[in-house]
Amino acid sequence: MADTAIPSGGPVDPAIIDDLVAASRILAKHGVLDAWGHVSIRHPKNPERYLLSRARAPALVSAEDIMEFDLDSNPVDQRGRRMFLERFIHGQAFRARPDVNAVVHSHSPTVIPFSVTGEPLKAISHIASFLVNGAPVFEIRDVGITQGLLVTNNQQGQALAKTLGDNPVALMRGHGTVVVAPDIQRAVHRALYTEVNAQQLAVARSFGRPITFIAPDEAHDPKRMIDSWEVWKAEAMKE
Amino acid sequence: MADTAIPSGGPVDPAIIDDLVAASRILAKHGVLDAWGHVSIRHPKNPERYLLSRARAPALVSAEDIMEFDLDSNPVDQRGRRMFLERFIHGQAFRARPDVNAVVHSHSPTVIPFSVTGEPLKAISHIASFLVNGAPVFEIRDVGITQGLLVTNNQQGQALAKTLGDNPVALMRGHGTVVVAPDIQRAVHRALYTEVNAQQLAVARSFGRPITFIAPDEAHDPKRMIDSWEVWKAEAMKE
Amino acid sequence: MADTAIPSGGPVDPAIIDDLVAASRILAKHGVLDAWGHVSIRHPKNPERYLLSRARAPALVSAEDIMEFDLDSNPVDQRGRRMFLERFIHGQAFRARPDVNAVVHSHSPTVIPFSVTGEPLKAISHIASFLVNGAPVFEIRDVGITQGLLVTNNQQGQALAKTLGDNPVALMRGHGTVVVAPDIQRAVHRALYTEVNAQQLAVARSFGRPITFIAPDEAHDPKRMIDSWEVWKAEAMKE
Amino acid sequence: MADTAIPSGGPVDPAIIDDLVAASRILAKHGVLDAWGHVSIRHPKNPERYLLSRARAPALVSAEDIMEFDLDSNPVDQRGRRMFLERFIHGQAFRARPDVNAVVHSHSPTVIPFSVTGEPLKAISHIASFLVNGAPVFEIRDVGITQGLLVTNNQQGQALAKTLGDNPVALMRGHGTVVVAPDIQRAVHRALYTEVNAQQLAVARSFGRPITFIAPDEAHDPKRMIDSWEVWKAEAMKE
């Protein structure tokens, strides 16, 4: 794999990198990303490239850590940097979903109980409207395991992208989530409120009463995330 | 809608604005308001006007963000500022309830499970005495939806105010709460302890035993919130 | 009530006041005390006097706020300071229990569900050994209510002390707790771990299996709280 | 017990002590260690010695607090320092398990409910793969109690090590955990994710559905903890 052979998508506006770094820190600050997990964006000038941090805890990621990859997840210019083993989640999601420009892989804590029980994770709050159709659960054994439940190659990444289909979120059994969106702001919103909706649904389930989920005609996909992005970024970057 | 045609209620004591800003930050700090949600007060000199931030995350609101509206939620002097889409919740609550001088709209996290199950949210703690008669649940479909479950016009705002009736709190199904009070201090108190009482009641319910709710003659509406306001404000404003 | 007629127990070592202030802030920092609640100690030189802050949120209490009371909860030298309405909890606990030198009244959040259901709050963790015999629940209606569930006079305070008996903790139905101990360090320990044990027991109950509680011969009352007091105080006072 | 008679394993690289201190603070910061609990490492030059703080709250431990012990938990050079009563947990774990180089004893809050109900604490998340075979529960009464549930001598420590067997984690009924690992980084990882997996499993259990646990061939023991250790240490040591 001669990574010098892969041409770059070109220089990226520092403001865009800045938002990618912020996304990583926001999700760490809110407990959606733990010491692992990662956020990527599609290269703004070349849809066949994506941008992702070198292997580093999300709370510590900064602009200099961002690397460029092709959709097979080969690095454009590795320069000896250690890479996330699971970057194939990102590459294959970008390949399968031309509408997607940002991907989050998390171990979102309250999603795990849903992933191992088959309890459907559907929206009960309008802020989690994106979960109106629930979230499919990826079973890695169906494609074959390599290192535990980790997604470590393109075949597994492709199978995960297939389970994701045209949904915004897929659960990974015993592992976490993959969350996709048209932009980084909505990817962060979706990753955050997947966790919040999971917490709320667990409480609602405990009452043992029928639950009114968000109906398809009630789902609302906000065009802009101005207000929330301003505060999330301000709070995450001041630390 | 020529908003220059709407006369202002007049200048407002900066100390009053300061408390409105504090209310917003207190509720953000305590997790009752997320990146959205809003707090308003009735104009102290003109009961036909109210004061509410421009569209901005509650944790970031400051004095310069406060705008003035009439009870139809037309801005007195917009000056190009972006407004909360859901300000009609406030205008119609002030119109329907002459006794109310402060309104909170939140996505209070633990209220959602109650709003989608019909599990009654009644006071089990004397600090949440205001919930002694429970909280009615607003179903926006009864009046018709426009943008998901959002309250985006006066008709919906009026229907919500009707559901609220003479209660201090109404739940909005799959969405959140509207909380009203005679003053900003008690509005903050009620918004905070609606969340706390919801958390406590969920635990109490899990025991599967009969629950002793606060009885009508035990409900206690404190006249002053001096102690709590002092600490809430001090902690929220130091950040 | 001529409070100038009540002689003081005499000056108190500032280090003792400092620990009383720390106790208040520790319990506020750990969420056991909210914007109300209070901690007192018996006067080190006169067992007929006790020391308690003027009415002020626990997180803000400092040495200058400490007042002196007799066991009927009359102030020794009020000087116009506003007093806690519920100070009778303290006075009557000190009167009924010569072995007690520190009292906490809290609205400890997870205690409320136990107080309104009759679910017994007994120790499942050895750190909460003091709850080995459970905690009696005080029903204020048995003595008569004045202001909601608040303890506002000596008669109610006395009835509460009677329910407490020789236990370290009593729950107050729909209200909170009273916690007593031979010294301020253990009072803080007990108030903290009453909350922790309540949280743990709620989880244990959810499994629907028989629970092994701490047995009487397993209960362990530490003589010294050196390690915990050092860290609790350091963390609470640095803010 | 003439502790001057016990020869030291020799001076230890300050970087190793630094990681031991960090481990203590990381686990305190994440709520796994409360005001008590302790972390130890085997002496890097002499397998018959181990290093553990003098009796001090984990959040306050620094390099000067580290003492050296033999595997009977006699101090090499006590110099009047107060020692942890329960250090025998460490000495006997190091003796029984040559593969172990780091030991944590915690009161990990959500582990208690599992320890007192017999509800099996098994891995549902791949990050907690080390719990693939569950965690045995130590019943101190089987060996005899001295001070409550505390492990205060070598006989009890040996019995605990026997219950631990070749597992990475044992629960101590009504008390907490002992966690062992080949290195300090993995000991911290295991202590943290024992708590996280316990929280997640409690939620999963509440759904009342069959649970898919991590299967033996899915368990994954990471060789390096570079990413997580970097962020955990950075966050814990900056305070």
Image (cartoon, coloured by chain):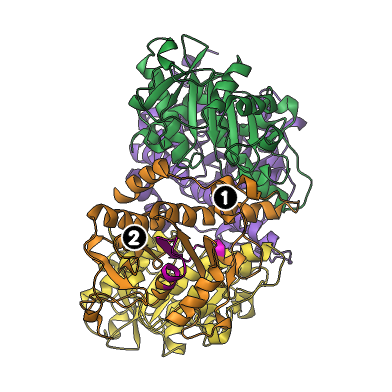
Chain colours: A purple, B yellow, C orange, D green
Frontmost of labels 1 and 2 is: 1
A193 part of magenta stretch: no
Residue A219 is situated, as x and y percent measured from the top left of the image, at: 61, 62
Q: Which mark is residue B213?
A: none
> Label 2 crowding class (10 Å Cα cut-off): few <14, some 14-19, many 20+?
many
Q: Dot 2: what SS?
A: helix
The correct choice, above or below, for D69 with respect to C225 in the image is: above
Whether residue C136 is visible to the viewer of this picture, yes or no, is: yes
Q: Dot 1: what SS?
A: helix
Left or right: A109 in relation to B105: right
Q: Which residue sits furthest right?
A: D210
Q: Amino acid at mark 1?
A: Ser
Residue A129 is situated, as x and y percent measured from the top left of the image, at: 59, 58
Which residue in the structure is indicated by mark 1?
A: C129
The correct choice, above or below, for B235 with respect to C216 in the image is: below
- State which quadrant residue B165 falls in: bottom right
Q: Which residues are magenta?
A: C92-111
Mark 1 and mark 2: Cα distance apart in space: 27 Å
User: Which one is in front, D173 or A161?
Assistant: D173
Q: Chain of mark 1?
A: C
Q: Amino acid at mark 2?
A: Ala
User: Which one is in front, C200 or D228?
Assistant: C200
Q: Chain of mark 2?
A: C
The residue drawn where x is 41% and y is 38% is D57
Residues tagged by mark 1 and mark 2 found on one chain of the structure: yes
> Label 1 crowding class (10 Å Cα cut-off): few <14, some 14-19, many 20+?
many
Count of residue discs = 2
Q: Which mark is residue C59?
A: 2
Give the quarter of the figure containing the C terminus of chain B: bottom left
